[in-house]
Image: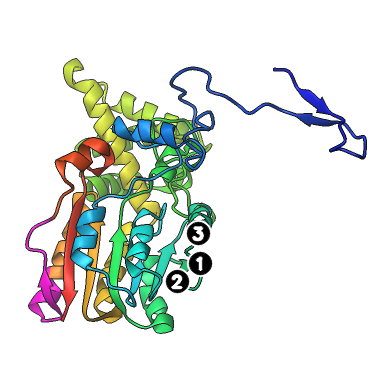
Amino acid sequence: MENKINTSAENPSGQQTVHKRRVRYSGTHPRSYKEKYKELNPEKYGDTIEKVISKGGTPAGMHISICVNEILDFFQIQPGQQGLDATLGYGGHTRRMLECLQGQGHLYALDVDPIESEKTKERLEKLGYGPEILTVKLLNFANIDQVAEEAGKFDFVLADLGVSSMQIDNPERGFTYKADGPLDLRMNPQKGESASDRLLSVTEEELVGMLVENSDEPYAEEIAARIMARNRRNKEGWTTTELHNEIEEALKFLPEKDYKEMVRKSSQRTFQALRIDVNHEYEVLYSLLEKLPGVLKPGGKVAILTFHSGEDRLVKKSFQRFYREGIYQDIAKDVIRPSKEECIRNSRAKSTKMRWAVRA
């Protein structure tokens, strides 16, 4: 690659400045996250973004919000109301709710990811949603009561419990076995224990329990035994590829016709179980559910999107309990799912379940 040296009038000091060309696609379908510079710049390459989405994909560094119409139909947001997006993420839901407020009222938004929340805040500010209408807090949604103490109670609260696509796609975050990177899996990589460290310290019995309780993994014992054997051989940190390879080895006993699909599913479940564990996801969800009635105004509405059975069970039982106790005046009798059209357009929507409740 040729570098160009600038010694023009724009550089009056006369010092030589080396300009490097931007990394470009190495082919028509780049696999490297950093090579996807068009997808990572949606404002500049809108046609590329639309092309990826139209084929059912999610552009790198971007997140497509799920069940937006269903959420807005339920909330019926009015100008002047006060709301809370407990999971800011890429800001897709937040933006649509802000549009409904029409410049009147206020929306609070929470996120524990310091990397992505700052990007989203800047993105929304450029769209005209500054501090007069939007307050973004780096805070776990388990602490929604703290926000309500400051802001007052809410007319509507949304919690999207899915992992953002920006986190999944970035190999440096370690959320997927499909790209090599450090096995981190923390929503906030600046706090707590990484999944790699967790694997090095966990006992075999604990690991089996984690895989069963967090993801219903049918081969929990085989996978845990393989991980423990690797730990005895190697005390160094884990990578995403290493974990996937050990799962492949653990399931070698399966029939050839089932092997590839079972490895894929077990890898997904193992990563999910570890992610839930290192982020204490069930504990913080339970805290959110217990505190929700206390932050909603009478008639206030809450909608929650879940992505696996463990989350949905917790939400369902909480809503049913508070409904029986008369704390919620109404709850969703059945889950609401994304439309067939949305699932075609966004494959990551397929496992989504939405439940709602209304405060008495």
Give the spatial CA distance, label 3 vs label 2.
12 Å
Q: Which residue is denoted by mark 3 in the rendering?
A: 121
Q: Are marks 1 and 2 in contact (CB under 8 Å)?
A: yes
Magenta residue check for 293: no
Give the spatial CA distance, label 3 vs label 1.
9 Å
What span is colored magenta in the figure?
Answer: 320-335
Q: Earlier in the sequence, mark 3 or mark 2?
A: 3
Look at 45% across and 51% down and name the residue there: 186
Quarter holding residue 96: bottom left
Magenta residue check for 323: yes
Residue 124 place in picture, x, y as percent = 47, 58
Front position among marks 3 and 1: 1
Asked if residue 42 can be seen in this view, the reply is yes
**What amino acid type is highlighted by mark number 2?**
Ile
Q: Earlier in the sequence, mark 3 or mark 1?
A: 3
Q: Which mark is residue 133?
A: 2
Q: Which mark is residue 130?
A: 1
Q: Is residue 307 left or right of residue 103?
A: left
